[in-house]
Amino acid sequence: MPEEARSEFWKGLKPITDSVKPDAQPEVYLSQVATDDDRYYAPLSETVGSRPLWINVKDNSWADILCAKQAGLVNRHYHPHEVFAYTISGKWGYLERPWTARAGDFVYEAPGEGHTLVAYESDEPMKAFFIVKGPLIWLDENGNTTGYFDVHDYIELCRNHYEKVGIGADYVNSLFR
């Protein structure tokens, strides 16, 4: 049950009856997703972790909070599909681009973009909300392909991490839609 209305103009408005179709999956509702609890961030590198929020195996996509508590490096990668990002705190950017994202900044990455994702030193941890569509193609410093990371790799990474830290590997299943 949602919070009860007090003085809002819609107080007393009745919710829709049968608002969810019989075969529909429920929404994912997670409170305080940009938590400081390190257990929720599966390590993508030695300095950057990812908290999964939503995973779509069929479309090879996911939403997450990326977090770095100090200067960090994810890696060099290429996106064959689009990516969306919203900065919650701290600073991050791509070595190949002329901007630095700060709290409140939005970034749209068009398909066909390669870059080196870094987190800068900051008074606050770097936390950004990402929607990743399709795999990440790992690159070397010359832009040559060295591997890939797709939704299946992400699921395995998160399950292994969550099992190790006591949350339980099955937690990841609750994020599938």
Image (cartoon, grey):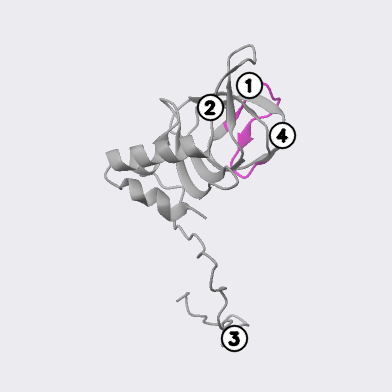
113 falls in the magenta region: no
- Label at residue 13: 3
Q: Calculate the distance from the C-alpha at mark 4 to the C-alpha at mark 1.
A: 18 Å
| Range of magenta residues | 92-106
Q: Nearer the viewer, mark 2 or mark 4?
A: 4
The answer to which of 51 and 175 lies nearer the viewer is 175
Image x and y of residue 120, in percent: 53, 27
According to the image, label 2 marks what residue? Answer: 120
Instruction: Identify the mark nearer the N-term, 2 or 3.
Output: 3
Q: Amino acid at mark 3?
A: Leu
Disc 2 secondary structure class? loop
User: Where is 56 relative to 157, above or below?
Assistant: below
Q: Calculate the distance from the C-alpha at mark 2 to the C-alpha at mark 1.
A: 11 Å
Q: Calculate the distance from the C-alpha at mark 2 to the C-alpha at mark 4.
A: 25 Å
* Camera sees residue 125: no
Image x and y of residue 94, in percent: 63, 26
Q: Quadrant of residue 18?
A: bottom right
Q: Amino acid at mark 2?
A: Tyr
According to the image, label 4 marks what residue? Answer: 111
User: Where is 67 relative to 95, above or below?
Assistant: below
Q: Amino acid at mark 4?
A: Pro
Instruction: Identify the mark nearer the N-term, 4 or 3.
Output: 3
Q: Quadrant of residue 10?
A: bottom right
